[in-house]
Amino acid sequence: MAVPNRFTSLLEVLEHCDDFPLPQTDLKAYAARVNSLYHFKVSPYATTLGYVLPQVAREFGACQGWDLDETRIPRTLTLCTSPEAASRSAVIASTLARFKQNGTFRILEHWRSELKPCYGPTGEVLFAIERAAFPLLGIVAYGVMFIAYTRDRQGHVTGLWVQRRSEKARTHAGLYDGTAAGGMGVDETSFATLLAEAKEEASLSGEFIRRGARACGTISYFHTRRVEMGGEVGLLQPGVHFLYEMEVPDHTMPESNDENVAGFELLTLGDIRGEIFAGRAKPWFALAVIDFFIRHGIISEENERDFVEISMRLHRTLEFPVFGVSFLKTL
């Protein structure tokens, strides 16, 4: 007997990834959710940088350099150090090392030894944090998603090169992902991340990528972590992915160069759609594919009933400082 699909529509696929309540659709539910969480801040800024689960906030609040305020709504968790990025980063590193040693959070079992940035209200890096730990503070994660695709002689898109994650991968084991994808490090541009990930995951050289990769904007979402991601369930993960695509010749074949990548498959449009509906694709990769389908006219208002809502929802406005938004000082 055939296994039923996990999703019945592309809008359901999107809502699976972007699952934090939307204020414009249910303000009461949104307000209740936001007020049930601690708002993470960095002194002296008043800006909220992320939402933190109560049990997580209390663990941080018990450590030196952190202040927990439960007397107001919303409740706050504030990092209180001297106002230099290095000082903030040092306190965070010390706190996380203590948690890791004590086994406080399961998510830290997936320690990467990679630093990721947290940006402030004017685009500056406030601190760097271990990659495995950023969901604890609910801060925005930035990454790159690259899709290599093929066309026929008539110019129609025929297939997408997708990677199958290893069954031993730390997160989303066995699921489909982009041709290359990865998180952005401190002081790293999206294109530099693309070059590194394409070589590391798919054995595609920098020269090859520079010849044809095309920037295609971004997707943004607000995701709640689930069991398949490892670690604590319910941690909040807002994300922004910079999208790139590249038409490649039929003879081009990505090859795995990473233990987390089991291999690559050239899937037809129907096949990749079927895998997404079956729930066998990473949530944000599924969004990137939907965005790809829109760009190339594969789905439109003529064949997708939720086209307008999907098009808008692929670019969620996040409540937190977003890299690049405030970089323009003058017009």
Image (tube, rainbow, N blue to C red):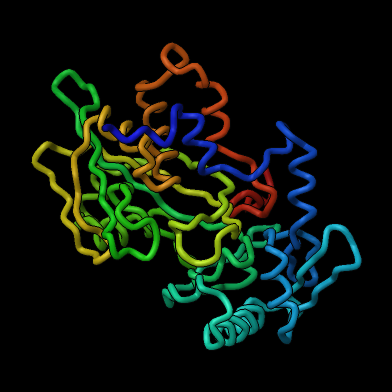
Task: Identify the image quadrant of residue 183.
Answer: bottom left
Q: Residue at x 56, y 73 (%)?
A: 128
Q: Residue at x 60, y 65 (%)?
A: 118
Please determine whether, in this image, residue 106 is positioned above or below residue 255. below
* Percent of width and height locating residue 148: 26, 41
In this view, the residue in front, 64 or 9, is 9
Please determine whether, in this image, residue 98 is positioned above or below residue 215. below
Q: Is residue 21 visible?
A: yes
Please determine whether, in this image, residue 28 is positioned above or below residue 102. above
Q: Is residue 81 visible?
A: no
Left of 127 or right of it: where is 132? left
Task: Identify the image quadrant of residue 57.
Answer: bottom right
Number of disc labels = 0
Q: Which residue ends up furthest to the right in the rendered image? A: 71
* Percent of width and height locating residue 308: 55, 21
Left of 262 or right of it: where is 331? right
Left of 236 or right of it: where is 202? left
Q: Residue at x 56, y 87 (%)?
A: 102
Left of 197 or right of it: where is 295? right
Please determine whether, in this image, residue 99 is positioned above or below residue 219. below
* Percent of width and height locating residue 105: 56, 75
* Percent of width and height locating residue 260: 28, 63
Image quadrant holding the C terminus, namely top right
Q: Which residue ends up furthest to the left in the rendered image? A: 251
Image quadrant holding the N terminus, namely top left
Q: Which residue ends up furthest to the top in the rendered image? A: 302
In this view, the residue in front, 106 or 117, is 106
Q: Residue at x 68, y 38 (%)?
A: 22
In this view, the residue in front, 26 or 162, is 26
